[in-house]
Image (cartoon, rainbow, N blue to C red):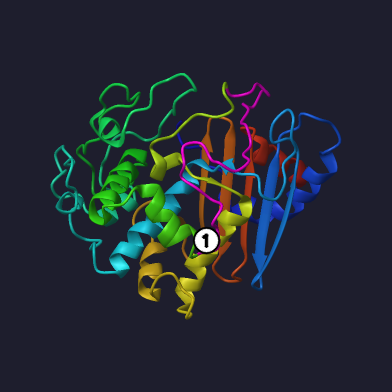
Amino acid sequence: MNRRTFATASLAALLTPAASALQAQQTAPGLPGYQIAEIKDGRLTSGYGGAATPQTAVNEGTLFQVASCSKTVNALAVMTLVRDGRVALDRPANQYLRRWQLPGPRGADATVAELMSHTAGTTVDGFAGYGPSEKLPDLMDILAGRTPANSAAIRTRRRILGGFSYSGGGTTVLQAMIEDVTGTDFAAYTRAEVLNPVGAPRATFQIEPSAAFAHGSYGNGQPVPGGFKRHPESAAAGLWATASDLAKVLQSVMRSLGGGPDALLPAELAQRMITPVSWGSGLGVFVQPGAIISHDGRNHGFDAVMAAELGTGIVRAAVTNRNGAIEGFSERVTSR
């Protein structure tokens, strides 16, 4: 599904009051589910409500598909390889790919950092996912655009002045690179090296989580058939997580910027992540210099947003299982 860009800066400021509006509205069954989370002065607070499925309510542990927020976790996974000297950001990704090579006019030269910042000129902006009865492609099928994949082949195209062009396809190339470099399944590597260390052990890149998860719905309230679309394009769109998990992911970037002993990354790598390359795109995050780092995402039936204020250190995140719900709740708050 094509990425939906929220007004992340304003949403970040509104998530806490919007949560109050959300909680006040949870008076009837069938309303969209939500979770919100805030980390301030090192303290995590969270809220939740609404329906996870027609039969169950959302609780603090309910997992939501967080769509393109997956890309930040992928970026942190790549950065752990850079930290460990196994990958260099400014070298071509093809040097690390073993099962497949990125084709196209700049395929041989497209660097790891360019893929992370959406400046490599790669194709395929987003992924539609797969319904419950559709055959799932493997990662090589997706990269090659080969049946049963429902997306085009991923390749580079000519780019103008190294400019920004959003590409979930480029992120999927990085998914393959992580597996080729580590010899480990992407879900297992990210769990061990990113999700567990940042304090989000329940978050998962499993196609279908073993823990309780929400079912998605469209903006008109119609449910997504089967509850959700399956995303083998894990790095680009496949993470299941809570709002608290997303807050902890961005908190790990903030801690790394501070260079503390519990930091996931060295400060210089965290700084590279939040340095804009083109159109506010850093490496796995979007950046308003000196103000906010963020990411957001939309899959069929799910919206997510997370943001961290660089000046205050406050981190906020929200997830819902109805498309458009986050925006709608924020609009209600601002109209008061």
Please name the residue shown 51% across and 72% down the image.
Answer: 255
Q: Position of residue 3 (x, y in %)?
A: 47, 37
Query: In the picture, residue 225 is in which quadrant?
Result: top right
Of residue 151 and residue 158, the one placed in the foreground of this image is 151
Please name the residue shown 14% across and 39% down the image.
Answer: 105
Of residue 157 and residue 27, the one placed in the foreground of this image is 27
Pointer 1: what residue? 250
Q: Position of residue 218 (x, y in %)?
A: 61, 26
Q: Is residue 280 visible?
A: no
Residue 71 lies in the magenta-colored region: no
Left-right relation of 258 to 46? left
Of residue 210 and residue 197, the one placed in the foreground of this image is 210
Q: Looking at this rendering, what residue extends furthest in the front direction?
A: 210
Residue 218 lies in the magenta-colored region: yes
Left-right relation of 45 to 259? right
What range of the chain is rendered magenta? 198-224
Query: In what element is the residue under mark 1?
Result: helix
Q: Position of residue 248 (x, y in %)?
A: 56, 61
Q: Is residue 82 above or below residue 177?
A: below
Q: Is residue 77 visible?
A: yes
How many marks the image carries: the answer is 1
Left-right relation of 290 to 12? left
Q: Amino acid at mark 1?
A: Leu
